[in-house]
Image (tube, grey):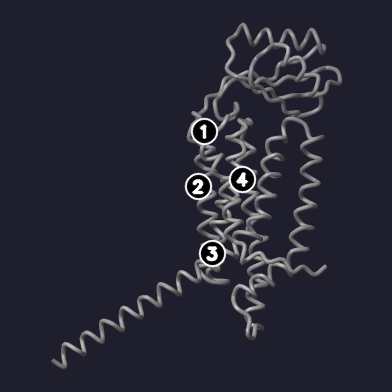
Amino acid sequence: MNFNFDFVNRRKWWYALSLLVIIPGLIAMALHRPVLNFGIDFTGGNIIQVQFHQPVTSGQVRDVLDGLNLGKSSIQESGSNQFLIRTTELNEEQTNQVISTLQSKLGQLDLKRNEKVGGTIGRELTIRGVEAMVIAWILMIIYITIRFEFLSGLAAILALVHDVLVTIGFFALFRWEVDSTFIAAILTIIGYSINDTIVIFDRIRENLRLRKKETIEEVVNRSINQTLTRSINTVLTVIFALLALILLGGETTRTFALAMLIGTISGCYSSIFTASPLWIDFRHLSRERHRQAAVAKADTKAKTRKATSH
């Protein structure tokens, strides 16, 4: 299917739309403390591992915990009729109440593990995640600079920052709970988005070699249109899988799938509407700066010759 949409000349509209999505999230992050609604993985609490003697589902365990009003809690199936339960910090009496209630409502069980964990692991996980993201960005800039040029790498990284801000902004704005899988989702989004951007940059490079009298804007516009079908098909297949995961995957994968859904849509948008238009603007700015530098240099030489002649 051949498209002929004018993406490039409307780029200011796309920038404005991005800001319209990002700014409310930034405001939410500025107003809320903590910035995100961190889950037990970050704040600390109790870890209780139990194994039932009879078949039990995670939904049944969730119903029992909801009835105890423990606040935040997460349930992970860790084996046959075995569950890893993370709760806010509980004292001994509350822990005994959880065990006895599970046993009375769901049947005989064995307590495999019961320990308190602090938020240190979560903070360390956050720091490591940010470090991994920064390292990934630096390596991507180096790779794209070698493969294309530095301005392409800069535009691609800004598009990735756009995707990260959109995803985090949604979670900050709606106060959705963030767990350790959120960091994995952010890093996955970065990988997905940069892949789509590089495909478009590859097509731009090919078309630049073949262009005759086209302007750079026309070449970029044609390149985006030529890869549009591929971008749409790719994002739709990922969205369908993520929607299934959100609807049917349960609590343990919901944060990951929701973050991935937002980031995937944002990544597709930024690859088409942000990265390449930014590259054009950076290219124009760079050429204008070089032109001004050349004019200033010529003026200096002219003044020097004039002073010498006198």
- Mark number for residue 131? 2
Secondary element type, mark 1: loop
Disc 1 or 2, which lies upstream in sequence? 1
- Between circles 4 and 2, the one closer to the viewer is 4
- Mark number for residue 186? 4
Q: Residues within 10 Å of mark 1 (few under 14, many from 20)?
A: some
- Between circles 1 and 4, the one closer to the viewer is 1
Residue 129 image offset from top left, x and y in percent: 54, 43
In the picture, measured across the screen, residue 187 lies left or right of residue 303, that is: right
Distance between the alpha carbons at the discs numbered 1 and 2: 19 Å
Farthest residue in the left direction? Answer: 310
Using the image, determine if residue 254 lies above or below residue 239: above
Secondary element type, mark 2: helix
Distance between the alpha carbons at the discs numbered 3 and 2: 19 Å
Q: Amino acid at mark 3?
A: Gly
Disc 1 or 4, which lies upstream in sequence? 1
Q: Residues within 10 Å of mark 2 (few under 14, many from 20)?
A: few
Residue 285 image offset from top left, x and y in percent: 46, 69
In the picture, measured across the screen, residue 220 lies left or right of residue 105, that is: left
Q: Amino acid at mark 4?
A: Ile
Farthest residue in the bottom direction? Answer: 309
Q: Quadrant of the N terminus?
A: bottom right
Disc 4 or 3, which lies upstream in sequence? 3
Secondary element type, mark 3: helix
Q: Residues within 10 Å of mark 3 (few under 14, many from 20)?
A: many
Distance between the alpha carbons at the discs numbered 4 and 2: 12 Å
Disc 3 or 2, which lies upstream in sequence? 2
Distance between the alpha carbons at the discs numbered 4 and 3: 19 Å
The residue that appears at 66% across and 60% down in the rendered structure is 272
Nearest the viewer among 197 and 27 is 27
